[in-house]
Image (cartoon, grey):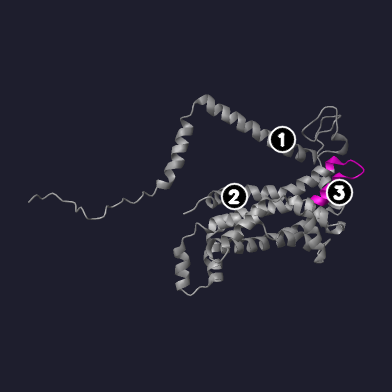
């Protein structure tokens, strides 16, 4: 009898487990293909990317530079990027524009109103959207798919078409001309529900089964299991919602009439529409308005990209 090992024909075939770096092969191959690309192609791509970055950043740089200029140095026969004196060419930048804009037109009050709207709206929107998304993804109930299709269909309706009904309902509920009227109609977003649902679909069912065996109910599973795992998607919703509502102009413009309740975009629009042109103050106000958005995006941009990538995966 041969000492060689024989293979039992009835035994199941053993499939080797994927290596630990299997998930990284595709990115590595992509990087190698980029490095092996022809030099003219890579040079063209870099030139286009740099050109696009310059075009995108030029208005922002000009805005910041103009916010430090003296009124007489804004409009000159020869444009100057730096805040220099038009006659002497010497540095004439000043921070007084920022102090002055905070005293004009209730700009400081509008800044406070925008902070209140963001602090109240974003957590409430995050909670309601996450609850709805978890129900659509993990809780079976009659008509779930049909109801979700109805929610998705609302994304295709232009927002301007819903403006008058929203105003009517908001005023009938007694929330007109108030920050409550700005916040409540924006507490739910169909797109955010869709985004979070896609992430909740990727969660393994074994986690919920283990939590159920331990005696956890649906709300406990949602709060203690699903939400902590959904941090990347929640970060995307939080950041994009903050950017959108911080810069939103149309809905506050329609629902608010009292200047003491204006948000920052409304105050900035009122400043720009003044009878006397004050571009140096408008640019200073624009810098104040945009800095929180830029800061949050720079800090959390990696979470935005990771969250969008993860919400597109499905196990």
Decide which of 206, 299 is in the foreground and name it.
Answer: 206
Pick whichever of labels 3 and 1 is earlier in the sequence: 1
Pick whichever of labels 3 and 2 is earlier in the sequence: 3
Image mark for residue 273: none
The residue positioned 52% from the left and 60% from the top of the image is 229
Q: Name the residue under label 3.
A: 270
Residue 231 in picture, x, y percent from top left: 56, 58
Q: What stretch is highlighted in magenta?
A: 265-280
**Up-down relation of residue 74 to residue 232 (above or below):** above
Mark 1 falls on what kind of element?
helix
Disc nearest the viewer among 2 and 1? 2
Pick whichever of labels 2 and 1 is earlier in the sequence: 1
Q: Name the residue under label 1.
A: 58
Is residue 210 in view from this perspective?
A: yes
The residue positioned 62% from the left and 50% from the top of the image is 299
Give the left or right position of residue 4, taking residue 128 as reference.
left
CA–CA distance in space, label 3 to label 1:
25 Å
């Amino acid at each position: 009898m041969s000492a060689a090992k024989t293979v039992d024909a009835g035994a199941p075939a053993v499939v080797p487990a994927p290596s630990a770096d299997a998930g990284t092969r595709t990115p590595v191959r992509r990087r190698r293909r980029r490095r092996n690309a022809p030099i003219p192609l890579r040079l063209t791509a870099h030139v286009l990317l740099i050109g696009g970055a310059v075009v995108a950043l030029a208005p922002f740089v000009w805005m910041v530079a103009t916010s430090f200029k003296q009124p007489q140095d804004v409009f000159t026969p020869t444009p100057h990027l730096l805040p220099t004196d038009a006659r002497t060419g010497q540095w004439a930048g000043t921070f007084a524009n920022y102090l002055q804009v905070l005293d004009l037109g209730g700009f400081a009050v509008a800044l406070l109103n925008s902070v209140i709207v963001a602090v109240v709206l974003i957590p409430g929107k995050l909670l309601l959207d996450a609850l709805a998304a978890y129900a659509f993804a993990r809780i079976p109930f009659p008509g779930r798919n049909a109801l979700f299709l109805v929610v998705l269909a609302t994304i295709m309706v232009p927002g301007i078409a819903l403006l008058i009904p929203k105003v009517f309902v908001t005023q009938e509920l007694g929330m007109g001309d108030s920050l409550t009227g700005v916040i409540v109609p924006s507490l739910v977003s169909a797109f955010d529900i869709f985004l979070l649902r896609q992430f909740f679909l990727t969660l393994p069912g074994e986690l919920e089964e283990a939590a159920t065996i331990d005696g956890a109910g649906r709300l406990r599973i949602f709060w203690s299991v699903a939400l902590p795992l959904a941090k990347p998607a929640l970060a995307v919703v939080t950041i994009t919602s903050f950017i959108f509502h911080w810069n939103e102009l149309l809905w506050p413009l329609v629902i608010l009439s009292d200047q003491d309740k204006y948000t920052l975009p409304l105050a900035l629009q009122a400043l720009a529409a003044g009878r006397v042109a004050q571009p140096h103050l408008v640019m200073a106000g624009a810098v104040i308005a945009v800095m929180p958005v830029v800061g949050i995006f720079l800090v959390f941009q990696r979470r935005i990209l990771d969250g969008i990538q993860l919400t597109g995966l499905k196990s």
